[in-house]
Image (cartoon, rainbow, N blue to C red):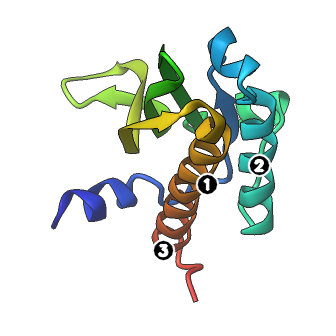
Amino acid sequence: MDLTEYTRHTLQGLQGVVVVVESIKSDAEADGLLATDLQAETELKLSQAGIAVLAQDQWSQTPGRPWLYVSVNTMKYLASYFFSIDVQLKQEVSLPREPSLVTSSATWEVGSIGFVISPDLSQKIRDSVSGYVNHFIRDFLAANGKLT
């Protein structure tokens, strides 16, 4: 079993996710990259794919408390940016040796690093995050027998 298949299995039985987008640095925001856009686009894609986007009260009552975490880190250099993107499914897990010890951990993850000129920052990041969310959707649907 390859790593993708292994991590895909951790999505089996999930009832939905809450989406958490990490805050964006102010210089990247000034160049048009907004966390609110990433949040809205991610939630829309999930909803359109039939994956429940949980409200906070639903999430706190959902087994495993799964959350799709989107993190974009940027470092401006002259008129361009170095960036890293991580999209992770985090959920509660326990250790076999101590089942009562429960913590949150990433059980599924994709990401990349790159370089882009400032005027293209927002579109490049939004396109990349969209692609990673599509990857999550495919894996979620496959793990839950909903992929056609």
Query: Can residue 90 be seen?
Result: no
Q: Quick one: label 1, few (<14), some, or many (20+) residues within 10 Å?
A: some
Residue type beneath disc 3 = Ala
Which of the two discs, 1 and 3, sits closer to the camera?
A: 1
Query: Can residue 6 be seen?
Result: yes
Question: Residue 41: which numbered mark, if any?
Answer: 2
- Pick out the residue farthest to the bottom: 148
Question: Residue 142: which numbered mark, if any?
Answer: 3
- Residue under circle 1? 130
Residue type beneath disc 1 = Ser
At x 79%, y 38%, the residue is: 37
In terms of sequence position, does the residue under pointer 2 or pointer 3 come before the other? Answer: 2
Distance from disc 2 to disc 3, alpha carbons, whole Å, reads 22 Å
Are the residues tagged 1 and 2 within 8 Å (C-beta)? yes
Q: Where is residue 110 in the image (x, y as percent from the top left)?
A: 39, 46
The quadrant in which residue 5 appears is bottom left
At x 50%, y 21%, the residue is: 74
**The one of 82 and 118 positioned closer to us in this rendering:** 118
Task: Find numbered disc 3 in the image and state the secondary structure of the residue it sits on.
Answer: helix
Please, is residue 74 above or below residue 134 in the view?
A: above
Q: Is residue 44 left or right of residue 97?
A: right
Q: Where is residue 134 in the image (x, y as percent from the top left)?
A: 57, 63
